[in-house]
Image (cartoon, rainbow, N blue to C red):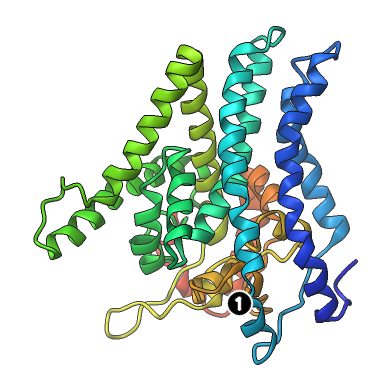
Amino acid sequence: MFERLPSDWMLAIKRWGYWLWLVPVAGIPLSYQSSLSSQYPNAWPWLVVLGVFGVVPILDLLIGRDPANPDEAVQVPQLEQQRYYRYLSLASVPLLIGMLGWAGWVMVNHPTWNWLGQLGWILSVGTITGSIGITVAHECIHKDTPLEQFAGGLLLAAVCYGGFKIEHLRGHHVHVSTPEDASSARYGQSLYAFLPHAYKHNFLNAWKLEAERLTRKQLPALHWRNELIGWYSVSAVLLLSFGVAFGWLGALFFIAQAMVAFTLLEIVNYVEHYGLHRRKLDNGRYERTNPTHSWNSNFLLTNLFLFHLQRHSDHHANAKRRYQVLRHFEESPQLPNGYAGMVVLALCPPLWRAVMNPRVRAYYAGEEHQLTDSQLTHP
């Protein structure tokens, strides 16, 4: 639908289109209000989950892709200097934190939900904090301004995943698409084999990396300057606040939505790098990260929802680029749908392998030897 529009037109559309992140967030209060007067109150809390993972993949296919890139000489410098885009993403932070607190109140005060409605509410809220919240956090932690660094850490603390701030920058971006990176799924590896290792690695490697940083400063690991202690303390304060304000059910809600959110993050990690790897050079080192080491998804709608997160190939090749200037590369391996659709596919390993394994093999056609034993974990 938009694939033939001039680049200038697409930039104008996307300038305002990034505000679409408000739509799934608005689905949370909408589902609550709709359930109050409904004969089926336990169905409405599932609205956001069904919308994101049922409707959005279809809309991605109908609306189509966006291949337009900003001009590097003129438009990119202009776009990067416009604070509008920075404030646009930062505007989500107070709204998401406020929504999370309000959702905890709803959880314990809605009179007609049974366990099914409460489960739908947790999954819907976790979908928002995991998709919009962690996406904004990811954008912020890659930037140098203190405000963005704080915003990114706060959003991650709100889902009890503060270690991502450390491990993602100093671990994942260094070792991406190599056997050393637990956030890069091997060819044939199922999502359910990937997730436990990813959870464990994210936590332990974050502590290891932070301890190494403090050791270089001649400080002990358990020091007040340990960033992880700070962000996990924020998570503990939030958990305590939910418990004090809303009782044990409120505390349980906070933990449960966090688990949904960071699980969604790790599923997206699985999707972003499945089966791709950097070649090992004669000197024993891996080739430099480039746009061929991440799956790209250029479907317009989900890219607007997720601040161009799906242009992941350019992000890994140029981690400091702001979301509004990330580029599409035709040479990058391409996903057949947006992240919402790919998450659903990943939850069913036989379907995932049927769709993605041929794409991995086709991408390495002519050099199948690149699918070594370290990559080939499933026939």
Which residue does the numbered mark 1 point to in the structure image? Answer: 80
Q: Quadrant location of residue 296?
A: bottom right
Q: Quadrant location of residue 36?
A: top right
The percent coordinates of residue 76 (x first, y second) are 64, 82
* Three-letter amino acid code at the position of disc 1: Glu
The percent coordinates of residue 250 (x first, y second) are 51, 18
Q: Tell me if I can see residue 187 in this picture.
A: no
Q: Is residue 315 left or right of residue 168?
A: right
- Residue drawn at x 47%, y 12% as measured from the top left: 247
Q: Which is nearer the eye, 116 or 344?
A: 116
The answer to whether residue 71 is above or below residue 286 is below
The answer to whether residue 370 is above or below residue 349 is below
- Residue drawn at x 65%, y 63% as measured from the top left: 308
The percent coordinates of residue 338 (x first, y second) are 71, 56
The local crowd at label 1, few if under 14, some if 14 to 19, many if 20 or more residues have their Cα within 10 Å, is: some
Q: Which is nearer the eye, 226 or 131?
A: 226
- Residue drawn at x 43%, y 61% as measured from the top left: 375
Q: Tell me if I can see residue 195 in this picture.
A: yes
Q: Quadrant location of residue 200?
A: top left
**Quadrant location of the N terminus in the rendered image:** bottom right
The percent coordinates of residue 182 (x first, y second) are 38, 54
Q: Which is nearer the eye, 83 or 375?
A: 83
- Residue drawn at x 70%, y 34% as measured from the top left: 49
The answer to whether residue 118 is above or below residue 164 is above
Q: Secondary structure at mark 1?
A: helix
Number of numbered discs visible in the structure rendering:
1
